[in-house]
Image: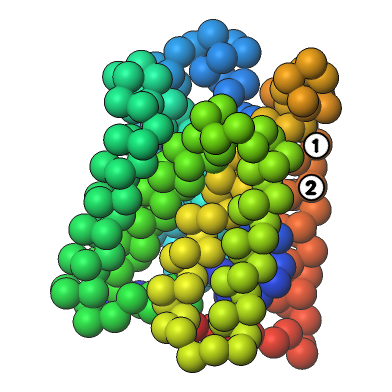
Amino acid sequence: MRTVNKIAQLTLGYWAMKICATTLGETAGDLLSMTMNVGYAQSTIILLAIFAVSLVFQMRAKKFIPFLFWTVMLTTSIAGTTLSDFLDRTLELGYALGASLLLGSLCMVLLLWHRLEKSLSVSSINTRRAELFYWSAILLSNTLGTALGDFLADDSGLGFVGGAILMGSLMALVGALYRYTKVNTVVLFWIAFVLTRPFGATFGDWLSKPLESGGLNLGTLGSSAVLACTLLVLVFWSTRLLKAPDAQSSSL
């Protein structure tokens, strides 16, 4: 069934909001599962249910609504945080095995998406089936990124800041490949999308963790509040730009 395109344009503002949403997803997920002691399994069930409700509203929307789009993006990020922790810690799969399973699942979704839709466009999605594939891939990407971020922060020896610097450098490399080479832009998009999640995870941990652990000691509540306000400002700003008569678009 054909629908209107309800996906945010791929601009620098998009990536800024994506990084903010993924960082907030890390701190908010930890706030629910650890600070409030709800637990990984229960938190995952609650957050996946919230994601499902937000996705229903997104699928039923008749046009692109920035606040709704970024609400769904945020719910995938928060749910991805607790889902990854549930797989890696509660089920004791470990970061390497958990990340491998999530990467395989993401590749299967992308292959099935391409096989059925004959395209992996992430800027012009105008069928309900493609929209479902898009959000499934987004959820898996955010969950995969969480596992990678936790591995960098906990097991790699890089720490929060080192992990964030590494991921930031890799994202800059992807940006250079997009700008100066002819590497497939859709492939670059999904690489960049996955990389923003461990960057957000390590950056979020740096904000929330205590000083003795190498963090800024803002706590999960304080970090989440700061990031939520920042994301709201960015989404409001993007909404104003969208309404401007000279708004420019960008697509892959």
- What kind of element bears circle 2? helix
**Residue 121 appears in which quarter of the rendering?**
bottom left
The image shows residue 91, relative to residue 78, as above or below, that is above
Q: How many marks?
A: 2
Q: Which residue is mark 2?
A: 230
Q: What's the distance in space between the residues labelled 1 and 2, CA to CA?
A: 6 Å
The answer to whether residue 203 is seen in the rendering is no
- Where residue 237 sits in the image (x, y, percent)? 79, 64
Give the position of the N terminus as an image quadrant. Answer: bottom left
Where residue 100 sits, quadrant-wise, is top left
The residue depicted at 36 percent of the width and 41 percent of the height is 99
- Which residue is pictured at 69% across the width and 87% down the height? 248
In the picture, measured across the screen, residue 236 lies left or right of residue 191, that is right
Q: Quadrant of residue 8?
A: bottom right
Please state which of residues 30 and 160 is positioned toward the viewer in this rendering. 160
Question: Which residue is pictured at 33% across the width and 76% down the height?
Answer: 120
- Which of 4/199 is in front? 199
Dot 1 and dot 2 residues touching (CB under 8 Å): yes
Q: Give the class, few, some or many, for how many residues have Cα within 10 Å of label 2's Cα (few <14, many ≥20).
A: some
Residue 208 position, x and y percent, is 73, 26
The residue pinned by badge 1 equals 226
Residue 102 seen in this snapshot: yes
Q: Residue furthest top?
A: 37
Amino acid at the residue labelled 2: Thr
Characterize the local packing of mark 1: few (<14), some (14-19) or many (20 or more) Cα atoms within 10 angstroms: few
Residue 17 disc label:
none
- Helix, strand or loop at label 1? It is helix
